[in-house]
Amino acid sequence: EADIYQTPRYLVIGTGKKITLECSQTMGHDKMYWYQQDPGMELHLIHYSYGVNSTEKGDLSSESTVSRIRTEHFPLTLESARPSHTSQYLCASSDPTQESYYGYTFGSGTRLTVV
Amino acid sequence: RKEVEQDPGPFNVPEGATVAFNCTYSNSASQSFFWYRQDCRKEPKLLMSVYSSGNEDGRFTAQLNRASQYISLLIRDSKLSDSATYLCAVNAGSARQLTFGSGTQLTVLP
């Protein structure tokens, strides 16, 4: 059913490791987003992209980086993970021509724990 | 002031009750409005878009009040399965991103 996929679903990793969270969508959406959400807290936009080779930082300062080399793929990388990066990371996408009707579609998220 | 504000709740209501949530927004240029549902530790899922004339989907009714800059969600005949966090989202235009509220937590009690 899901047209936007995130892997891994859960990740426990040691401090200082480099990690990449994957996000892929099969809907051909131009716009993609990364949100960070702590349990019971609000969504914070950390990165977004309006298309290939377009990336922008969001409202919440983040030490992560993103790339958009292909329309369907929007990976997020942390060069050196720290315990403060422990959170849930949600990827979303949207079709700008239909956004006013359908909003964003979210992936199922990656729950990251840095120990 | 936050761009989008919601009453955080929690709202604890008995099965069969009617419950209403409000969400206020500060940008008068806002054009698109949505209600999302988020279950515990899951991703938000679109519940319904909110149209100017108001719209209904089964037990759910959404309304927009542009003059007072708020949207509302009414749930009638609450079910246990309605227990979740309800997020409103507002877009000030296609060049902007959706801004999400912090969510209202609903628990429907047997």
Image (cartoon, rainbow, N blue to C red):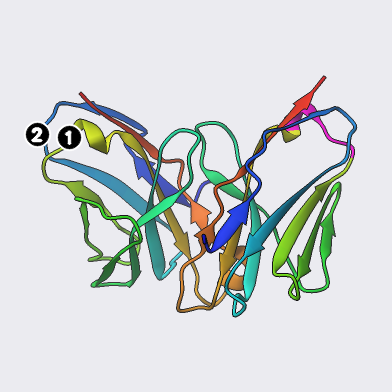
Specify whether A7 is left or right of B84: left
Q: Earlier in the sequence, mark 2 or mark 1?
A: 2
Could you tell me if the residues under marks 2 and 1 are in contact, i.e. CB atoms within 8 Å? yes
Q: Main secondary structure of the magenta part?
A: loop
Q: Is residue A60 magenta?
A: no
Crowding at dot 1, Cα within 10 Å, few <14 / some 14-19 / many 20+, comes out as some
Q: Mark 2 to mark 1: distance in Å?
A: 6 Å
Quarter occupied by the N terminus of chain A:
top right
Question: From which residue to which does the magenta span run?
Answer: B77-81
Q: Chain of mark 2?
A: A
Q: Residue furthest top?
A: B110
Label 1, on which residue? A82
> B5 or B106, which lies in front?
B5
Specify whether B35 is left or right of A55: right
Label 2, on which residue? A16
- Residue A46, quarter of the rendered image: bottom left
Per the image, label 2 sits on a secondary structure element best described as: loop
| Residue A1 seen from this side | no
What is the x, y in percent for residue B53? 83, 73
Q: Chain of mark 1?
A: A
* Residue displayed at 11% across by 45% down: A79
Specify whether A65 is left or right of B76: left
Relative to B10, say whether A37 is above or below: below
Relative to B83, say whether A4 is above or below: below
Label at residue A42: none
